Amino acid sequence: PARCVVAVDGPSGSGKSTVSRRLATALDGVYLDTGAMYRAVTWAVLQAGVDLQDPEAIAKIAQETELSIGTDPVAPHFFANGTNVDGPIRGPEVTGAVSAVAAVPAVRRLLVEQQRALIAGTVRIVVEGRDISSVVAPDADLKVYLTASAAARAQRRSAEDATDVAATQADLARRDRLDSSRATDPLRQADDAVEVDTTGMGIDEVVSHLLDLLNSKA
Ligand code: C5P
């Protein structure tokens, strides 16, 4: 397709990143990892030593933090205030704090605005997150809600991170609970999003299924 926006939402570990990057490459488009934006702001919040219970202080840091968000689907790189944060944003400190930061309404307003501007400036883009279909890009050409069983999600994530499966499953469950229960833009399946359960599906299979869905709409 000439111009297209694909929204990919779903819980942690559902395969969103891998699938979104592969799909963006197949479309010869770019990729926007909105989770990386929340993670980069969280990194800055932790650097500043701000209290995670203080939404105003968190919002202030978010406003002051200059993000540079890479959109190359093969090698996206992220900077906060000029520092490369590719490594630290995947670390346990940021992962442990990100849901609290992402629950602050002023942080969401700020990042959603940046996400919309980024999307508007592109031709073909795959955007992954929690609220893309419902909030960021409700006009997307294809809206996908990726799921997988809790066990499958934990297994994939722990294989990626070389961590314990049980601990990973507990951490994913904790984040899902926080992300689904927050007041502002919680994780939920949009009414018009196509649910794709990737349990037992390979990456190639998921990507070609999404390409089929996109082509059947064009
Ligand atoms: O996708 P990823 O696991 O990197 O996202 C990290 C966290 O960022 C999520 O657990 C969620 O709290 C937040 N997030 C969000 N909205 C998005 C993307 C991520 O609230 N669109």
Image (cartoon, rainbow, N blue to C red):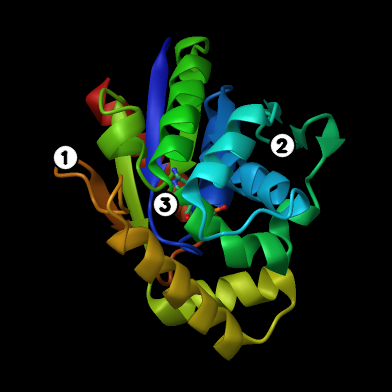
Q: Residue at x 24, y 26 (%)?
A: 217
Tell me where residue 197 sits by quadrant: bottom left
The residue beneath circle 1 is 192
The residue beneath circle 2 is 74
**Classed neighbour count for the residue bearing mark 2: other residues with Cα under 10 Å, few (<14), some (14–19), many (≥20):** few
Residue 66 x %, y %: 70, 26
User: Does residue 131 appear left or right of residue 16 in this picture?
Assistant: left
Question: Is disc 2 in contact with disc 3, using a CB cutoff of under 8 Å?
Answer: no
Q: CA distance from mark 1 to mark 2?
A: 29 Å
Tell me where residue 78 sits by quadrant: top right
Residue 202 x %, y %: 50, 62
**Secondary element at image label 3:** loop
The residue closer to the viewer here, 174 or 196, is 174
Question: Is disc 1 in contact with disc 3, using a CB cutoff of under 8 Å?
Answer: no
Is disc 3's CB within 8 Å of ligand 1?
A: yes
Q: Residue at x 16, y 40 (%)?
A: 192
The residue closer to the viewer here, 84 or 207, is 84
Q: CA distance from mark 2 to mark 3?
A: 29 Å
Q: Earlier in the sequence, mark 1 or mark 2?
A: 2
Amino acid marked by disc 2 = Val
Amino acid marked by disc 1 = Asp
The residue beneath circle 3 is 103
Considering every residue shown, the one lying at the far bottom of the view is 166
Residue 97 x %, y %: 59, 62
Q: In the rendered view, would you say 205 is above or below 76?
A: below
